[in-house]
Amino acid sequence: MGKKNKIYLLAYALIIFLVPAIWKNNYHLMVLNIAALNIVVVIGLNLLMGFAGQISLGHAAFFGLGAYLSAIFTATFGFPLWPTIILAMVITGMVAYAIGIPTLKLEGHYLVMATLGFNIIIYILMIQLDGVTGGPSGFPGIPRLQVGGFVFDSDRKIYYLLWTISVGTLLLSLNLIHSRVGRAMAALSHNEIAARCAGIDTENYKVKVFVISAVLASLAGSCYAHYITFISPGTFSFFYSIQVVTMVLIGGIGSLWGSVFGAILLTILPEILHAVKEYNVLIYGIILMVVLIFFPQGLFPVVAGIFRKRKDEARSGMELVPGKGP
Amino acid sequence: MPEKVFQQNQTILETREITMRFGGLEALNALSFSIAPHQIVSVIGPNGAGKTTLLNAITGVYSPNSGEILFRGMPISGLKPFQITARGINRTFQQVQLFSNMTVLENVMVGMHPRTKSGFWDGLFHFASERREEKKIREKAETLLDFFGLLPKAYWMSAHVSIADQKRLEIARAMAGEPELLLLDEPVAGLNIRETEAMGDLIIKLKQTGQTIILVEHNMHLVMGISDWVIVLHHGAKIGEGRPEEMQKDSRVVEAYLGT
Ligand SMILES: Nc1ncnc2c1ncn2[C@@H]1O[C@H](COP(=O)(O)OP(=O)(O)OP(=O)(O)O)[C@@H](O)[C@H]1O
Ligand SMILES: [Mg+2]
């Protein structure tokens, strides 16, 4: 990671952790907490879209797997909290591997269909297996997040935990894309044939990135379950998958900072537009269309461009210049 | 660039009766030849003769329908492109295939992928070993760019440099994989006379480091000027091979070029 990114990251972390000192409204903090988790999902998805050239329409299912596995193992079976969250990530990762192996070996976009189908199946299972999941009425009484006896029982307390996870995810992901593996991923998403002939095992990388992407969604899902303490299938429907894809596109495919921007913007926006909340789906559709037509690189490069001289941009390399689109 | 050390075997690459069909078309027809190390071997032939298909078959982009390809005596047919690159064959493309979302330097750094090993965990946490390797990658890439005269443009986006620079960059990226055999598909197509001459000098300079090169080219002046050996393809079959001055006079070759 370059020096510039380190400074941005530091400034970002500083602002983030100062917010609760100034902002006293708990509801607003809750919205920001959800944004923190969305960022984790969206960064993971952007690694897949921007660095493996693939799209998943099933990230709600991975998010949901994390949430339900966490809920079931801790609340029903009394497993300890953090090992459960890790266990959920491992299981979700294995599920993603099983989906990725057959679909990503084929050329083309089979993953889209596979993940879409998977999302629908998981959603139906959440509703049908009501003995385990609580069915349509949901799963209540999930234990709260805690670290060494300290229970995160308010929006304010949990803010620091969730945003630490969120900023940490960004840090590690920025590290990753500025490494040998990240370069290989950027290469394969941009020009697969050249990447293969340059000695990159593209199939293997695609599967790995997909697994990482699903594991991050699972982590966010687990945190969500232990934060809200109640989950129901509606949260994990196909619509959330669309939402996170939209967040990636708004931020710009291949730009991790853009993902932060996209996730925060689209988490807060519906809260600002309270009156139209029922038209959520419609609004997302319109935003998606407008951005894809007028800003195919995402909105973030446009916003960032206001603060950035052209010269810088040419030098910034991979960070602001996204890979080839889907 | 360091001198290359080879075992003294006389053949670095051998194809045995390779055939490659696209539907009813035989793009390669029972093609057999072998290539000695440290030479520039040119593959020539009219449009559609199967030259690019041959390079695709050698690099594993296509799998031949039959026949065998041996690299340093080991069969490589059926291996995937990344495995073949790891064994020491690298290439450029007829249509430049750069990572145009990256800088000139980054393109060469990607080329070093098969000779380096930092993995996902190293990438996530930037361990000391990863940082050392990254430094090594950057330095080696800069050395290569210097050799290819591209160092001043190291931080340019690769899409923004001239076509001649892009062609050289592609070779630099291929050389970053430390190949024992370098395949060049029409390296001077689209270049002007001066750029063509410079590219010829560059290829000779590469050969002087001990590099084995297969050159696919239509520019006969270049081919006859720098090749040690010439193989002529027509309709996917070999219709002649020999020293450049012999091939220039060969009646079958002249006929294939002058049209049937
Ligand atoms: N992927 C493919 N599918 C179908 N036909 C192909 C494919 N690749 C090559 N061919 C055909 O195989 C034949 C040989 O093509 P190839 O590209 O190898 O020729 P070439 O010698 O490189 O020609 P040129 O000098 O024009 O580059 C041509 O008839 C071409 O149309
Ligand atoms: Mg060709």
Image (cartoon, grey):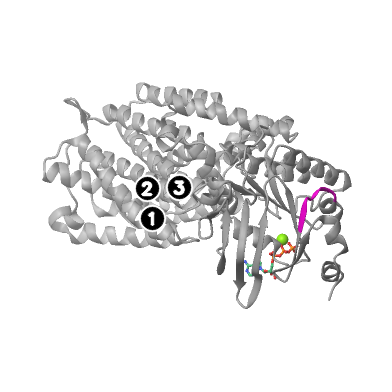
Residue B36 placement (x, y as % from top left): 68, 50
**N-term-proximal mark, 2 vs 1:** 1
**Can you identify the residue that label 2 sits on?**
A211
Have a look at marks 3 and 1 and say if they share a chain. Answer: yes
Q: Disc 2, disc 1: CB below 8 Å?
A: yes
**N-term-proximal mark, 3 vs 1:** 1
**Quadrant of residue B48 within the rendered picture:** bottom right
> Label 2 amino acid?
Val
Q: Sort mark 1 into few (<14), some (14-19) or many (20+) by Cα contacts within 10 Å.
A: many
Q: Sort mark 3 into few (<14), some (14-19) or many (20+) by Cα contacts within 10 Å.
A: many
Residue at horizontal 48%, vertical 60%? A109
**N-term-proximal mark, 2 vs 3:** 3
- The verdict on label 2 being within 8 Å of ligand 1 is no
Have a look at marks 2 and 3 and say if they share a chain. Answer: yes
Q: Disc 3, disc 1: CB below 8 Å?
A: no
Check the image and report above or below for A100 versus A321: below
Residue at horizontal 72%, vertical 71%? B235
User: Which secondary structure, mark 1?
Assistant: helix
The chain to which mark 2 is attached is: A
Residue A299 placement (x, y as % from top left): 55, 43
Residue A254 seen anywhere in this rendered image of the structure: no
Residue B227 painted magenta: yes
Name the disc covering residue A100, or none: 1
Name the disc covering residue A205, or none: 3
> Label 1 amino acid?
Gly
Q: Nearer the viewer, residue A175 or B47?
A: B47
User: Which secondary structure, mark 2?
Assistant: helix
Q: Report how far apart the C-alphas of labels 2 and 3 lie in the structure.
A: 10 Å
Q: Please identify, in this view, whether the residue under mark 2 or under mark 3 is nearer the observer.
A: 3
Q: Disc 2, disc 3: CB below 8 Å?
A: no
Q: Which residues are magenta?
A: B225-230
Q: Nearer the viewer, residue A200 or A78?
A: A200
